[in-house]
Image (cartoon, rainbow, N blue to C red):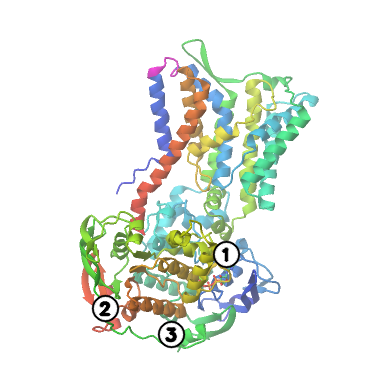
Amino acid sequence: MPNIRLGTEGVLALLILALCILLGFTTDTFLSLQNLFDLLNNQSVNIIFAVGLVVVLIAGGIDISFAVAASVVQYVVLTLLMPIGGGNWFFGIALAMACGAVLGLFNAFLIHQFRIVSIIATIGTFNLYFGLLMYFTGGVSIYDIPDWLYDAVPLVALPAERGTATLYLPVAVMIVMSLLTWFILARTGFGRAVYGYGSSPEAALRSGVRAWQIQAFAYGWLGLCAGVAGLMQAHIVQEAVPNALNGQELPILASVVLGGATLGGGRGTVIGAILGVLLLAVVQNGLNLMGVTPYAFQMIVGFIILVAITASNLGKILPGKARAREV
Amino acid sequence: MMDIAISAKHISKVFGQVRVLDDVAFELRRGEVLCLAGENGCGKSTLIKIINGVYTPEAGAEFQFGDDKVSGVTPHDARHRGIHVIWQDLALFPHLTVAENIVFDDYVASPLRPLSRKKAHDEARRIIGKIGADLDPDMLVEDLSIAKRQLVAICRVMRAEAKIIFMDEPTASLTAREVKALLDIARTLSAQGISIVFVSHRLSEVLDVCQRVTVLRNGKLVGTYPTEGMTQARLSELMTGRELTQEPRAAGKVGELLLELQGLSRTGEFEDVSLKLHRGEILGLAGLLGAGRTELAHVIFGMHAPSSGRMFKDGKPLALSSNRDAVAAGIAYVSEDRLNLGLVQNQSINMNTAATVLPELEAPRFFLSPKRIRQLTADWIARLQTKVSNAELPVSSLSGGNQQRVVLAKWLATKPDVLILDCPTVGVDVGAKQGIFTIIRDLADQGMSIILISDEAGELWYNSDRILLLRDGRLVEEARPSDIKEEELEGMINA
Ligand SMILES: Nc1ncnc2c1ncn2[C@@H]1O[C@H](COP(=O)(O)OP(=O)(O)OP(=O)(O)O)[C@@H](O)[C@H]1O
Ligand SMILES: [Mg+2]
């Protein structure tokens, strides 16, 4: 029997393709190079978050605090760098990664050491981080940011219909973070152990997998990604606003789940997470271009997620017939 | 060779208030096959988990691995020392592929080394070929039947090139042919100097493959004996502390026709099966794995629709669109795969037992009475002699054989007319097997009709009124135990 399985990624890719074609016909701007490049520029931050979050979901956990952690990182990095002359890209990214990783590791510590359920622990740190941020900043934004962070860094500029279409640095960073995460998850033994732990913690422990390593990596890596994403977000908007990322966690969680990760652990891929973000972005972009009110967007996103999850459960039911025969 | 591979002394373990292991000593020699025997719940799996660092023993334990004396172990240590385990609950990774499950220890041993999917695949192929199993390395383990998962767990340990292998009931869901292959492998490995600890409730296997047997009873060590000159009866006596005798079922009188199948087929699974089941009859279904016995049971239980043919119960046509209909029609099915289909592992023993009769327990006032649930469970625990310390604990805390009794209780609670038992004694100890068959025979004597599926010819021969043999999805023979010998039946099945 030929084993034709598209998998979640295939279905998502087809959906995105279909939507693009549809939008190409119904709007005259969607398929323009500028619009597509902008889509990538705008989604790079979300994708960096998403590839971090998928690691936590694969390991069988969940994290609510990462977007707030990213805001914290923005503030910490800027407050540390401004007095010493502003630093440079290298310092900035390294500091953002370190700072984000520490915030993530704190989650891992709570979850592993005190056996707190991950959702409870990260709701706790979400509030903790946000409260501290508001307390120390007084809710005031930072507009005075170093030049290297302020100036846009174009990477690819192509002539397009109206002027040029440009891809900026965050896209490159997004690609690097995605590749790194993909490599760790798919090409190292440790990455496979993360899947194993998410799939069956008990079996993994009996195989000699150390739970603390998995937890530390998963939450630490998400923190690191969040740090990078935070820095990129400040770079794109050229300022740091304390509640700019607040509320981003749920749409990103939704995209990752759309990309095939489950709250039960053991499932999910980097490609899936990226495609999940892109699908929602294309829908949003398309609705914008068609002049639909932004309020409709949330509704439609909710609908897509429900349909997607039902469909994947349907998928489980259908081969279930074949499975029962195996019994 | 008298080299010691593992020696463990003063091993005790207390769960809550219950002392499940009491100052047990365990010794494994290099290159021997040692059996760990004992009734369900005597602590075999717990001992294995302690030696592998999954559970920490009570203070005072001493371990020796080869020449190393240590006071504690972790799972990582154990793997590092070349100790590998086929766990009773398999402990596989459902979301990973067969190949990945087989090479998983590699992932742990070398977390950084980039490994190729192809290599994992080829490795898996090689090992699967070596034990002669029929497995697709690319399938997800969650899509496999329990028997195939068992094979994956075996492959995994074969792959590890272990020095010491613990096999906790590895043969429980295998067919005769696969069991034979596994026992051959065990012999080959032990000839290469690998030590094997083998747990099985099939005493014939134990006496066949093991050189020594360590017997536990109720968490205490009874002793270690050479298997030479040991008989099954003597071993059962050591395990249970009492003498067991087995009597063939007296050819009783059976009642009127209850269930009839006419030309029942399901494409690709079984074809043209016609049979009659009478009240109070125990009908044995014999055959090899894949002969269509379980598939037939699924159709009678309404889980799958037949592609043609008809069913009658009490002379009326029986149309089942789901197993709910089957339960309503008085049909119950005890699945062979108790870990997945039969029980909700993290729910209490009480809830699992009551799961099938909740509506009844709600009557007449539409709320569940915890007291009635407890009574029901307590009643079945007593009748089936299940070893339970507290029925509020999750089912997963029970030993394998005791879980099987909970499944049985759950279905008996529906008071069915037709009870289909799919390998009901897999993983159940000798004493309990007899207990279960006593119950089954009593049920039949009270008028229940029973379809008994089993891989063990002896079990069928002793307990059935009539035996039907399925081969490749077709009924090929019918026999009565009174007309043939046990060995003849065995021969017919394996022909
Ligand atoms: N995690 C646990 N919590 C509480 N009780 C437990 C736990 N694990 C095992 N037990 C109890 O310890 C006893 C020994 O269990 P164990 O699984 O070692 O038995 P076993 O000899 O392997 O039996 P079987 O032949 O049925 O597999 C049982 O009574 C069981 O209920
Ligand atoms: Mg056991």
C-alpha span from label 2 to label 1 = 41 Å
- How many C-alpha atoms fall within 10 Å of the one at disc 2: few (<14), some, or many (≥20)? some
Q: CA distance from mark 1 to mark 3?
A: 34 Å
| Position of residue B366 in the picture relative to residue A322 (left or right) | right
The image quadrant of residue A106 is: top right
**Horizontal and vertical percent for residue B459?**
35, 78
Q: Which residue is mark 3?
A: B232
Q: Position of residue B338 (x, y in %)?
A: 44, 64
Note whether residue A98 is visible: no
Specify the amino acid type for callout 1.
Answer: Leu
Left or right position of A174 against A322:
right
Q: Which residue is mark 2?
A: B254
Q: Mark 1 or mark 3, which has the lower sequence index? A: 3
Circles 2 and 1 in contact, beta carbons < 8 Å: no
Identify the residue under disc 1. Answer: B393
Q: Is residue A100 above or below residue A36?
A: below
Residue type pointed to by label 2: Val
User: Considering the image in quadrants, where does the C terminus of chain A appear?
Assistant: bottom left
The magenta region covers: A25-31
